[in-house]
Image (spheres, rainbow, N blue to C red):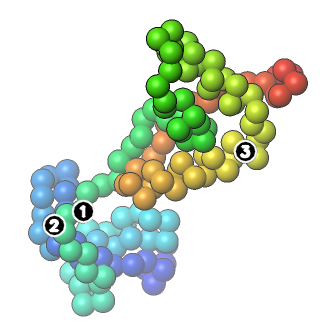
Amino acid sequence: MDKRASTAFLLQNALTPHGWRKNLSVLVNAFGEITEIDCDDRQSEAIHISGAVIPGLPNVHSHAFQRGFAGLAERAGTTDDSFWTWREAMYRFVGALDPDDVEAIASLAYVEMLEAGFTHVGEFHYLHHGRDGTP
């Protein structure tokens, strides 16, 4: 990777595998990967980040398509409401989705996760068949 395509950051407080460090210099390539730490020769051109910086977090159990279902089952119901009635509503929702719908919903969910600091996702889908029931 060409170092000219990298960006230098000076982090006021950064959590590292060795604990908190103050004024930590890092070089990040165009893919968002840290390629150098304590690159003091680049501090003058570095982008200064104040506050605390922590590594990106993993979301290890996601059902991104359920982002589109949010709010559709969160209401007071009859006393016979249960997980199973919620599940039936969720499957009705999923049954109405096509691949483009799933992609749009997942894209929204992933953008929201990224904005919240999640950088990796373990994704689970229940989508096995087309609307007509074919695999």
| Residue at point 20%, 50% (across, down) | 17
| Residue at point 74%, 28% (across, down) | 95
Q: Residues within 10 Å of mark 1 (few under 14, many from 20)?
A: some
Question: Residue 37's x, y, as percent?
Answer: 26, 68
Q: Secondary structure at mark 2?
A: strand
Q: CB of mark 2 within 8 Å of CB of mark 1?
A: yes
Q: Earlier in the sequence, mark 2 or mark 1?
A: 2
Drawn side of residue 2 relative to residue 19, left or right: right
Drawn side of residue 80 relative to residue 69, left or right: left
Q: Which sits in the foreground, 16 or 71? A: 71
Type of amino acid at the residue the image marks with label 1: Val
Q: Residues within 10 Å of mark 3 (few under 14, many from 20)?
A: some
Q: Which sits in the foreground, 89 or 128? A: 89
Vertical placement of 72 versus 76: above or below? Answer: below
Question: Residue 90's x, y, as percent?
Answer: 62, 26
Type of amino acid at the residue the image marks with label 2: Asn
* Nearest-to-viewer mark from 1 and 3: 3
Residue 39 visible to an observer of this rendering: no
Q: Earlier in the sequence, mark 2 or mark 3?
A: 2
Q: Secondary structure at mark 1?
A: strand
Which residue bears the numbered disc 2?
13
Question: Residue 107's x, y, as percent?
Answer: 60, 52
Type of amino acid at the residue the image marks with label 3: Asp
Which residue bears the numbered disc 3?
101
Which residue bears the numbered disc 1?
53
Q: Quadrant of the C terminus?
A: top right
